[in-house]
Image (spheres, rainbow, N blue to C red):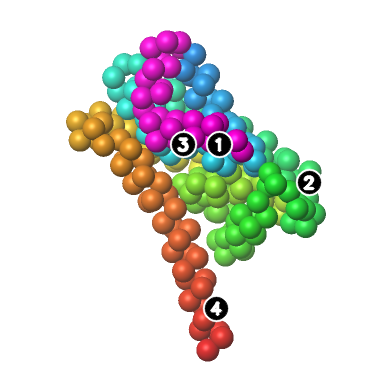
Amino acid sequence: MDSLPFMELIDFILHVDRHLTEFVAANGAWIYGLLFLIVFVETGLVVMPFLPGDSLLFAAGAIAATGGMDPFLMGGLMFVAAVLGDTVNYQVGHYIGPRVFEMQSRWIKREYLLKTQAFFEKHGGKTVIIARFMPFARTFAPFVAGVGAMRYPRFLAYNVIGAALWVASFVTLGYFFGNLPTVKENFTLVIFGIIGISVLPGVIEYLRHKLAEKKQQA
């Protein structure tokens, strides 16, 4: 990825509230389409796990609280985008199949696939729900579910539940707390906090795995 687009992406993630507010002011109702597209791409394309997710929902909720968007329309569209994104991701994984774990691709990180597969082996189908709240895993979980040939009706149930919980929780938090003076003045720190809390389960799981390995070696 070129340095300039990468830095622009980082700026968008860290100042997503400002960028969305500017987009609403300049383009009005097109904000719904932009949010739909970002959520769909982040959850639907396994090569795009770095797009904002949790922070985007939080910022959208905060803007909706100021009257910039209809919270129910916005939340509903993002829910649909999340469900459709995971469905597309699942179907791509199902089509490619297990051979993806042997592929050497600059676009699909094998280490993320293996970590997500290990998470599936431990937590089963509910990984699709849990992963909604974990950056990167959110993008790879439906793909790995498709590769592992999870039955689609079962996957769809987890997909819908996870999408509903994910969208509702972060949009609601943003709606009620995103416009507090302390939050608005320190929004970048809030974004880091959201990211930190989101990756914490993965860090804990990694440390537990390493500790178990050391015990076995001992």
Q: CA distance from mark 3 to mark 4?
A: 35 Å
Of circles 4 and 1, the one toward us is 1
Residue under numbered circle 2: 96
Q: Amino acid at mark 4?
A: Glu
Q: Nearer the viewer, mark 2 or mark 1?
A: 1
Which residue corresponds to mark 1? 3
SS state under label 4: helix
The answer to which of marks 3 and 4 sits earlier in the sequence is: 3
Residue pictured at 34% horizontal, 22% vertical: 64
* Residue 10 marker: 3
Q: Which residue is mark 4?
A: 213
As helix, strand or loop, the secondary structure at mark 1 comes to: helix
Q: Is residue 60 magenta?
A: no
Residue 19 at x, y = what percent? 41, 23
Kindly report which numbered mark, 3 or 2, lies closer to the viewer in this rendering: 3
Front disc: 3 or 1? 1
Read off the magenta span.
1-29
